[in-house]
Structures are given as C-alpha cells and as structure tokens.
Image (spheres, rainbow, N blue to C red):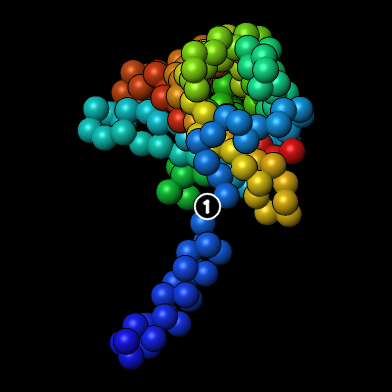
Amino acid sequence: MRLIHAALPALLLTGIAGALIAQPGKPDPAAISGGTYKADAGHTLVKWEVDHLGFTPYFGIFGDVTGTLQFDPKNPGAAKVDVTIPVSKVTTASTGLTAHLLKPAEGGKPADFFGASPADARFVSTNVAVDGQSATITGNLTLNGVTKPVTLAAKFYGAGMGMGNKENVGFTATGAIKRSEFGMKFLVPMVSDDVKLEIVAAFVK
C-alpha cells in the first residue's frame, strides 16, 4: 500500500502532463466547420526536388506562403484554393546555389533560373475532385511569368482547435512540373527537367 501511495503523485502528474501535451489536431473531417481559411505562412511549405546529374536528388523549399482556402465540408468538391508563393525567398542547403537560383540575367540572355527579384508564384484551383479524404486538385500555376495547368494529389491530414483557440486544418499534396515550360532550361537534362513537388498546407480560420 505504501508503494501505491508513493507512486500516486507521479502517476497523477504523468496523466496531467499527457493531457496537456495531447495533440489538438486529428484526422477527423468532422472537426472542419467550413468557411474561409487563411494560409498559415509559418507552417505551409513547398518542397521542390530535381535529379542532379543522375547522382543524387536535390531539393529546396519555398515558405511564407499566403492565400486562402474556401471549404464547405458538406460540399468539398466546391473547395477553392488561391495561394501566393514568394519565389524570392527560396532556400536550399547551399548559399551558393541559392544565390545562383536568384542570379540576374547577363549578356542579354535569360536568367539561368528565377533571376533577380523574381515575381511571386501563384496557384489558383479550377477544379477539385474528392475521393474520401483525398482529392485531385487541378489549377493554374503562374511561375516565372508563365501560366500552366498543374494537377496535385492532395490528402487531408488533420483539423482541430489550435493556438489562440482558432480552427486549423491541414493537408499534404504531391505533384510535378517541367521547369522548361516555365522558362528555366538551364542544364536540362543534366539537371532534370522534371521537378517533383511536395506540399504541406496549413490553414487557419
């Protein structure tokens, strides 16, 4: 009995701590009330990946994404996404490569990649086809002054009440583009034309 009584405070504290650190978000669509949500710029990321000379994949990230999601849980197929991606804030693990991505055009030639002070990219959905907790999102991506249709395979990740007692909802998505179609042909095909996209999208109501 003494051992039980001695252990009770620790057990109680463990239970309280567990309750305090429980994750507020869950993969439960019922937690989505619907309406207009704003992109959480600090937790929305776009990862891009290319093949580097056939030796290794190489990736970088865009962050500070802004925009909106309009979502009605009773009619998810009517969802609309409109997000803006600040290309000028692209980041990689190499300061030299990051600088090259933003290197200005020289000698009357086009820039190798984005060039100096590139315009923001923007994705605007045109159709959402829902299948359970997954969806195929078709939209127009404007990047480097070129607009092309892009299709994303999206999945619902979680929803719930987050910091500040605000409703949060999150998704993941994958897709691909050809960089040459957006005016970036430098070193194709040594550095792959195909660019894989992995997206983490967080929205707050």
The quadrant of the picture occupied by the C terminus is: top right
Relative placement, left or right, of 190 versus 152 is left
Residue furthest out toward the right: 36
Q: Toward which corner of the image does residue 14 lie, by quadrant?
A: bottom left
Q: Which kind of residue does numbered mark 1 sit on?
A: Gln
Q: Position of residue 30 (x, y in %)?
A: 61, 31
Please provide percent x and percent y for residue 74. 67, 17
Q: Is residue 72 left or right of residue 56?
A: right
Query: Is 21 above or below relative to 86?
Result: below
Report the number of discs.
1
Position of 197 with respect to 35 (left or right) is left
Residue 134 drawn above or below residue 36: above
Seen at 47% across and 50% down, the residue is: 95
From the top left corner, tell me how far across and down residue 62 is, in percent: 56, 38
Residue 137 percent coordinates (x, y): 56, 15
**Can you say which quadrant of the picture contains the N terminus?**
bottom left
**Label 1 neighbour load within 10 Å: few <14, some 14-19, many 20+:** few
From the viewer's side, name the closer residue of 19 and 137: 19
Could you tell me if residue 41 is visible in this image? no
* Label 1 secondary element: loop
**Horizontal side, residue 34 vs residue 17: left or right:** right
The residue at which mark 1 appears reads as: 23
In-front residue for pair 87/63? 63
Residue extending farthest front: 1
**Residue extending furthest toward the left:** 55
Residue 17 at least partly seen: yes
Residue drawn 24% across the image and 27% down it: 54
